[in-house]
């Protein structure tokens, strides 16, 4: 595309300031305390899409937070790209581990980001990456270089399972009709090693509750004589993995896609330093399923992790109590062919079956989604690859990600189109963690690369 | 003693109102937020001892909360009774399970307490039971029936391990010199089945911290590839009991006192209904160490219970995070001959030894204390037994308690005297739980029984 670099250089401060404004709003969808902020963010997205040149933008109400839909249709024979992103963010806690307040963005230089990175919750996931598309759109419309039709669908419930997006997509198939879906909500290997995510893991997220006695008890008077819900919960969770860290839920692996020796060898070629990986996390050893490498464990293998656990006295000092209840939030990452609803059922049945007498069990499914794979021979993937080739000067590496974007498989099912995952974040950007950030270089590089995808996709489509 | 009933009837409303005033102050020693309230309670205790007829009362400063010392010495040839109690209380949480605010006392009738019970944190443990001694003292001095010397030592750190009391006792042996120590901080079987606690379990209370990666991680990108501190913590805790619920810490049982068949048979005679026990707790089964009855499990056997656990995201909704740290508060109840400091060391070494690579472990001892046994052939026990005989019309049953009053063994060691545990609470009084309460009948029955102990102890002493 012409003049893209010069356009970015001319407007980059404004691009940054607009993003910073967006990042200042704590749009935490998981916590209803922030409802006003989430809604305020939705309004801001609507305005930004209008300014970027959409002919039509609307706030679509749902049973939860609204979905912003925008479009610019320039020719019925031209292909249509549907851009998806989300404006909600993860909760920032543990808040005390942030070096600067999560909703007061600051730009700081880092080893991975010598040009500086924006520190804020949502900087990378997904406000920063979503907004690259808005600014790319602005460039193409303001310089009359938009080569095809474009539709935007920006939701506010991605971090809580996109439950209402599913309904919206199912009931708006005509409106959302497209030839390819474009999402930037993933990462790449390194700024000098571009990669495109070709696979996502599915997800099943449940909450479990173990109830023992009908009230908290004095651990001296009852200790050893009644089932302690916390001790029981630890036993039950511990039993979900065997000594090889295989998951013990019957039937859990039945549909797991086993990659061929060749595919695994191909994966193994991606540059990876176990030493740097351990150093970055300050751990003396990695840990996981026997028989698989670190990169296999977090991409092609299903996993089960406790995301939160609580029960009893967790305040200052000591309290000799046996709690009446103990809780845990547990998520399972799934691979292609594992159905998240089947897995949720398998988990529930198994977890209930291993409960000893003396306790009651409640399993509440939170949300879930299927895994997904992008074929690298599709024109969508080819267009993305060429775009990276132009802006990074290197062919991107196709890579399976361990993350989940549950709605991607839903899109394929309901809209019959493939998704291209052009992620510009880095693993070290600490998404979902304290001190989340997004490289300024990556932000601008995304804005530069996206229009080229439009160009090549339109060309290959002909 | 003469006129005790009539004195109680005449003053019972005042006795109740004075206790209620004391219960309104949230003297939570575990939470520094309540420091002012704890100190205010100490002042109130001082005044009440002066009013009750002590000749000398002082607030003794410590490195923590003060100890109130009071005395009335009437003859150097007479025996001296040292009364111990505590004015601090447990934290009230979980607050939402209280039917009335924990520090706004109300009197309600219950099945176990047809004459009504005072509902408030500390009603039974230990403000109510401690204050019985103050009112018994008032009766004896105001009616000139105090038969011996009396000393009071009321502390404010019992619920957090009495660490400063130990120092105080060690450095005030002459001042605290006595012939018997009297404590009401335990319970009895039922209002129509009086019992006296003849044994206490020791305690070792530790806090453990498991650290994995140096920051919270996205469970999709890292799940399955790094040690999840919560999963690891559940595995480590689960491994502390075997399938028979024996504790697996090497050496844990080495010094455990094994009771004879006869002693266990004697214990078995105490009235106990397993059905009522399960019904009261709403559990379908009890749970504990194979080979022992419920009453043995919670009295003569050592135990290990998690009192609190936390880590990761515990807020509303779902967060797909792998926490950097996970924590648990763990307490072990010990039996006579188990040294709490040895056990704390055994726990620490074992817990560190079972940690897998990829995590760091920190074990912090909170506090602890030794177990204790009162000989039933001592004049102290005999005097107590006669007192109950008079006021309950029945000989009390000697009973081992599962609870711990760590300083009791310290008293024996430092002051060379035995402790009599005259408890008037019931197991159903929910101490350390929401809706703690203390029967009005029990409160007044304690005030009636205590002076008789003074009388009989003085007689038997001669």
Image (tube, coloured by chain):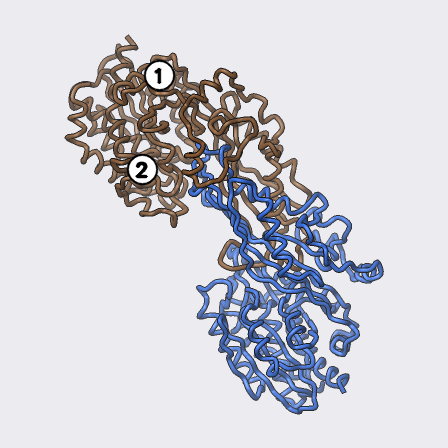
Chain colours: A brown, B blue
Residue B376 percent coordinates (x, y) = 78, 72
Q: Residue A273, located in which quarter of the rendered image?
A: top left
Mark 2 Cα shell of 10 Å, populated few (<14), some (14-19), many (≥20): few
Question: Which residue extends farthest top?
Answer: A462
Residue B67 sits above or below residue A202 on the image? below
Share a chain, discs 1 and 2? yes
Taking the image as shown, residue A261 lies to the left or right of residue A26, namely right
Q: How many marks?
A: 2
Q: Which residue is depicted at the point 43% across and 26% down?
A: A401
Kindly identify which residue carries mark 1. Answer: A381
* 1 or 2: mark nearer the eye: 2
The C terminus of chain A: image quadrant: top left
- Of A462 and B300, the residue lying toward us: B300
Kindly identify which residue carries mark 2. Answer: A111
- Dot 2 falls on which chain? A
Q: Secondary structure at mark 2?
A: loop
**What label sits on residue A120 in the rendered view?**
none
Residue A31 percent coordinates (x, y) = 40, 43
Q: Residue A445, located in which quarter of the rendered image?
A: top left
Q: Which residue is depicted at the point 16% across and 24% down?
A: A142
Residue B210 percent coordinates (x, y) = 51, 46
- Dot 1 falls on which chain? A
Taking the image as shown, residue A200 lies to the left or right of residue B231, namely left
Q: Which residue is depicted at the point 54% across and 19% down?
A: A258
The N terminus of chain A: image quadrant: top left
Taking the image as shown, residue B395 lies to the left or right of residue B173, namely right
């Amino acid at each position: 595309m012409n003049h893209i670099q010069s356009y970015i250089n001319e407007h980059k401060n404004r691009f940054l300031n607009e993003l910073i404004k967006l990042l200042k709003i704590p749009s935490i969808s998981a916590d209803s305390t922030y409802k006003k902020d989430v809604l305020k963010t939705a309004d801001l997205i609507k305005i930004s899409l209008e300014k970027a040149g959409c002919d039509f933008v609307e706030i679509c109400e749902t049973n939860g937070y609204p979905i912003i839909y925008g479009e610019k249709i320039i020719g019925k024979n031209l292909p249509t790209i549907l851009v998806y992103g989300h404006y909600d963010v993860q909760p920032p806690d543990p808040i005390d581990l942030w070096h600067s307040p999560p909703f007061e963005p600051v730009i700081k230089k880092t080893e991975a980001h010598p040009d500086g990175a924006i520190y804020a919750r949502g900087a990378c996931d997904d406000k920063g990456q979503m907004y690259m598309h808005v600014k790319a759109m602005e460039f193409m419309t303001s310089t009359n270089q938009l080569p095809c039709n474009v539709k935007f669908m920006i939701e506010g419930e991605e971090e809580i399972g996109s439950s209402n997006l599913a309904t919206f997509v199912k009931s708006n198939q005509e409106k959302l009709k497209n030839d390819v879906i474009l999402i930037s909500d993933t990462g790449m290997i390194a700024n000098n090693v571009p990669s495109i995510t070709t696979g996502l893991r599915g997800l099943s997220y449940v909450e479990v509750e173990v109830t023992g006695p009908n009230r908290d008890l004095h651990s001296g008077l009852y200790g050893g004589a009644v089932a302690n819900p916390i001790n029981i919960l630890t036993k039950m969770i511990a039993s979900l993995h065997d000594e090889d860290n295989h998951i013990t839920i019957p039937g859990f692996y039945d549909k797991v896609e086993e990659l061929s020796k060749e595919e695994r060898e191909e994966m193994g070629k991606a540059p990876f330093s176990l030493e740097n990986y351990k150093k970055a996390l300050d751990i003396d050893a990695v840990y996981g399923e026997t028989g698989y490498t670190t990169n296999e464990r977090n991409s092609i293998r299903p996993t089960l992790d406790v995301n939160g656990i609580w029960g009893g006295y967790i305040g200052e000092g000591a309290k000799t109590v046996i709690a009446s209840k103990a809780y845990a939030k547990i998520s399972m990452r799934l691979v292609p062919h594992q159905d998240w609803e089947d897995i949720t059922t398998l988990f529930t049945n198994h977890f209930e079956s291993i409960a000893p007498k003396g306790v009651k069990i409640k399993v509440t499914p939170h949300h879930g989604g299927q895994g997904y794979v992008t074929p690298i021979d599709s024109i969508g993937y080819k267009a993305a690859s060429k775009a990276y080739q132009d802006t990074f000067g290197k062919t991107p590496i196709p890579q399976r990600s361990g993350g989940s974007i549950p709605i991607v498989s839903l899109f394929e099912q309901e809209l019959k189109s493939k998704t291209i995952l052009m992620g510009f974040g880095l693993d070290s950007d600490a998404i979902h963690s304290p001190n989340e950030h997004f490289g300024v270089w990556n932000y601008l590089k995304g804005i530069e690369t996206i229009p080229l995808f439009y160009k090549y996709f339109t060309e290959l489509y002909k």
